Amino acid sequence: MDQSPPEPGPDVPQTIEGYYLLHDIYNVDWAALRRLSSAERTRVAEEGAAWLRSSAAVDQGDSAAYSIITQKGDLMFLHYRHTPDELSAIELSLKQIELSDYLIPAYSYLSIIEVSLYEVMAIAMKRLAERGITPKSPEFADAKEEEISKQRKHMDDRLYRDVPAQKYISFYPMNKKRGETVNWYAMPLDERRAMMRGHGSIGHKYHEIVTQVISGSVGLDDWEWGVDLHSDDTLVFKKLIYEMRFDSASALFAEFGPFYTGIRRSAEEIGVIVAGRQVT
Amino acid sequence: MDQSPPEPGPDVPQTIEGYYLLHDIYNVDWAALRRLSSAERTRVAEEGAAWLRSSAAVDQGDSAAYSIITQKGDLMFLHYRHTPDELSAIELSLKQIELSDYLIPAYSYLSIIEVSLYEVMAIAMKRLAERGITPKSPEFADAKEEEISKQRKHMDDRLYRDVPAQKYISFYPMNKKRGETVNWYAMPLDERRAMMRGHGSIGHKYHEIVTQVISGSVGLDDWEWGVDLHSDDTLVFKKLIYEMRFDSASALFAEFGPFYTGIRRSAEEIGVIVAGRQVT
Amino acid sequence: MDQSPPEPGPDVPQTIEGYYLLHDIYNVDWAALRRLSSAERTRVAEEGAAWLRSSAAVDQGDSAAYSIITQKGDLMFLHYRHTPDELSAIELSLKQIELSDYLIPAYSYLSIIEVSLYEVMAIAMKRLAERGITPKSPEFADAKEEEISKQRKHMDDRLYRDVPAQKYISFYPMNKKRGETVNWYAMPLDERRAMMRGHGSIGHKYHEIVTQVISGSVGLDDWEWGVDLHSDDTLVFKKLIYEMRFDSASALFAEFGPFYTGIRRSAEEIGVIVAGRQVT
Amino acid sequence: MDQSPPEPGPDVPQTIEGYYLLHDIYNVDWAALRRLSSAERTRVAEEGAAWLRSSAAVDQGDSAAYSIITQKGDLMFLHYRHTPDELSAIELSLKQIELSDYLIPAYSYLSIIEVSLYEVMAIAMKRLAERGITPKSPEFADAKEEEISKQRKHMDDRLYRDVPAQKYISFYPMNKKRGETVNWYAMPLDERRAMMRGHGSIGHKYHEIVTQVISGSVGLDDWEWGVDLHSDDTLVFKKLIYEMRFDSASALFAEFGPFYTGIRRSAEEIGVIVAGRQVT
Amino acid sequence: MDQSPPEPGPDVPQTIEGYYLLHDIYNVDWAALRRLSSAERTRVAEEGAAWLRSSAAVDQGDSAAYSIITQKGDLMFLHYRHTPDELSAIELSLKQIELSDYLIPAYSYLSIIEVSLYEVMAIAMKRLAERGITPKSPEFADAKEEEISKQRKHMDDRLYRDVPAQKYISFYPMNKKRGETVNWYAMPLDERRAMMRGHGSIGHKYHEIVTQVISGSVGLDDWEWGVDLHSDDTLVFKKLIYEMRFDSASALFAEFGPFYTGIRRSAEEIGVIVAGRQVT
């Protein structure tokens, strides 16, 4: 891995990538679990909780679990890791514990956290303007360099972060449309950039109550992006996405995959759920 | 949850939300039920009926059950609750009773009852006009405030209501189309509002024989809305939806998911059905 | 059910409805049937035949059975009944007999026989013309009333009829297209009516060798109509539908669901097939 | 069946039909087969081979078997018969032998061999021209009648033929597109005919190395046609269909279903494969 | 197979084909594996490793294995062979070993490595130009022949090669769009060629860190091409495909099937994984 990918062409938005993400959703075979003795079921539950605890305790990266509402899944595991190899190892480690005998695959998604360089540049320029520094100012070059490098550091906090702590998650994959007349990838760069700015400003309105984690999946999985919204209020997911649906980037170009709504569960709560007791 | 979502932009219809809804549809594994002894089967049936009865007996919210016609399902449970956490708890509580071993997941849907503020405002203005009060009348401001606050109270009766009592239900999820040339979200607000008015007036014609419960699901599930029609005559579902299909909002913009037609069943009747006896 | 639906708007074709229809298609678990002893299998087969015989012996309505060709199904039951409650009761009664343990759900469809009032009116006017009675004739009003009432009686023979007796069936659900530029529901009523006339005249050419039963399913199931063709020659299905595909109503606007081709089986033959013997 | 279908309208291509075709594709439950004793497995294999041998030995019609490559199937049976009743009887006879317990339904297709009369007429006119006979020649009428009757005889060899003997098969169902602007069924007859001529001339280039069997399935199954290509070289399937994809009839109007690539197997080879030995 | 396909028409890109490819993806039934005794499981794992080792040791062709990330598969086998018969034999040989009882079919794909002659010709002409030889040079004809024959030899290294050795794979099938207005197959040859050139030049930028294997599947499987990217860095898949998405050939005309991301595993590692131990 000593060779970097070549620079993208002028029309291609430049992105920087961080952790690989695996969303891993299962239904539970409750009937089979119930057929276990109480002691066996407790053992399965505790082993599962221990597996999640140790997955989350990794040095670099993170793991979390959610109860999915509706029949689309019972449990979702969300893993952040540096390499696809680590994600594959987590998948295989789950298969080695007994809990996996009671998990029915429902959906999964492979992607990688991404931040657009345009976004970084836009923030840097805005901060320079706030400091009264224009491209004509003598200190512009140094100040710009400094701001960008601050942004890059801030970016690392987004690229290599832990799973946001909020109680609820809304996860969905999406594409930009490539229709016969409405085709995102055939739009001029400037128009794409302007639309993404409008799109971003809606996200910004919500940034205190929603944490967004955008991950790219072109060439890795069936859609182009995975989106995770984390909030302490599920109603906010509806409000945010509904408002975005009216801005051009979404109204014209967004194609959505399935939506998964989940409630964050600690390792202990996963144990409680698998053991068949109510989470209190 | 002490932070409210920000105000939506000027083009975005403002909505107020009430109960979260879970539609939960299952097929029954009749062959496995038949393999039980009569006493076992009765126990399973009674436990199921008791679970439904206690779910419906909740202080705030409601639960109901339906027989679905066709192979798309045998039973549908419909739950109204204040929070997604309560819905998740209901899902998990069903998994803890033996009946769930005989239920095969068929379809489910998560949404939240919504009322549009435009709708509220329109009704208030109409009532003011009926009272002869125009925007130029000196008492207009106070009268308007009073009417809106009456409407809000009335709205609460829709947002936080019990499951309508009628015998039949037609449930279906739907989207507004975002095609390449026909795109609801790219239409001017005025045209959208005019179309929704025409749409609403058809609904109004039927309001004495059909109760509509509209729930939003953007960001929560795979379609944008869930629609429940409740009536004592299934033919009315056909007449109402067919007539709507010719108004612009539906003719041009509606995309429909699967339709589920059901017959309301009491907890006792659910017990009778699971026990393998005919409902009388 | 003492309240009638309101009159539809001027653009909406008025229809009159008759029996509710349930198409109920299953594959057979032949391996499990073979594992039964000969006596057990005979009992299952006879019980199944008896269920079908008694379903068909209902006072009002009818039931029939077909062998479906191809893997899309082994058996199709077709029920005509006055109410959805009766159809639900038939579904539940099938679940109570042992045969149902060997039936794997494959497809089903809920609809209601419909006749368009335009069609009735058109026939009445044609007959008046044949009798030399024009709108200017003094006896026009009475004669028209008389013809329409004759037609209504004839209509009852279509709305509340038995399952046609012919040997073969072709069943398929369908929609009228609501595309971005080609949209049936956005066409003027006159053009829709003219297209349906052309469509109907092809059907008329075949009326001596094909019986059509059109049922509406808007608001009841996933497509807008169910179509049953009954004939003593399956080739006729191909000829009729292929010819229709070139008239405007079909060429431009028809969207078809799956097609099921079946051979009518008596209750005795169903018993023979389930018992594993060849129908002679 | 004493009544013939009426003549089609002037825009509808006239066709003549021959044998009904059933493509019947299964995966094999190899794990269950392996659990049999060697003697049992041999018995199952031999019974299966005998069933295929006797199906193929029918007086009128034919039956053949193929190994399908990829997971889309393990075995495909292809039956040619005079009536749908005979195809249904074959389906039921397969269900009566033990091999069927180890066959998992994968795909199937019902259609009927068809030849277009336009095609017949075109060939007849071409042969008359070769003989120097023009519409103005005095002997034209008789000669034309004679040529058409020759063609009809030749046509019978195509309508009622055995399964072509070549080693490989490519089977796929297809439609002519009915899009919003590109709609085969809305094209003038002359343009359709011209496109089919271009299409046919590509087929003709390959006729020495590929045998095509075209079957119609409008009103019988989910697509409009089934296409079987038979050749001793699978590469020819790719070359032929790729070349056709650039002629207008295919480029603009063809919609393709799944493709199945198979290797012809004798009854003996089917026995060898089911018994778990390698075909040599 | 002594007859070659005819020359394609002037609009059809000429291609030369090499090995047939089978992608064969399975999920593993880990619960059933765990129910085996340790000795049994080791035997199943070793037998599987031996099968893969001997498949890869074939004289002409190659076989490789991958761990697929996400629930879309656990293991992918990739086989290169001269004939479909050999691929069918490999499929059947896998069914004869016990490991196959623990493999659940997930996806598969049949295709054949292809190289376009345009591409060969373009490279030859470029090399002639580099040598200063123009179509007017006296030595042009001989030099051109020589260059093309060099290219053909180089082509053989691509048509009949081993599976590239890199650690990661991205596999996906794809089509060129045949929409109502955007239709690859209705574009003039020159425009298609120009777009493919732009497309190729992006691929070329990455050629040191990605090996592409393009295989055609028209007439063989459900999409038109299969694409394999092999690299030592999965991020490169994202960068390469994302950049291509903005060039016209992809932006306007590409339709993508599912994407599979895998990690190369040796026969020994496959044994380790099946035995339930972590790959180190």
Image: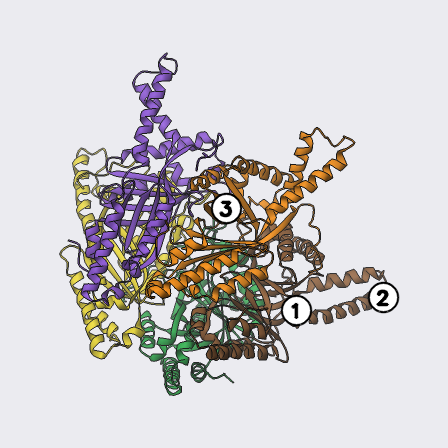
Chain colours: A brown, B orange, C purple, D yellow, E green
Using the rendered view, name the quadrant where residue D191 is placed. Answer: top left
Above/below status of E140 relative to E94: above
Q: Amino acid at mark 2?
A: Glu
Q: Do the residues under discs 3 and 2 have CB atoms within 8 angstroms?
A: no
Q: Residue D62: x and y, percent?
A: 19, 58
**Farthest residue toward the left?**
D59
Above/below status of B238 relative to A126: above
Query: Which residue has dot 2 on it?
Result: A139
Residue B261 shown left or right of residue E248 in the figure: left
Numbered label attached to residue B165:
3
Question: Dot 1: few (<14), some (14–19), or many (≥20) neighbours within 10 Å?
Answer: few
Query: Which residue has dot 1 on it?
Result: A165
Q: Residue B212: x and y, percent?
A: 53, 44
Q: SS of the residue at dot 3?
A: loop
Q: SS of the residue at dot 2?
A: loop
Chain identity of mark 2: A
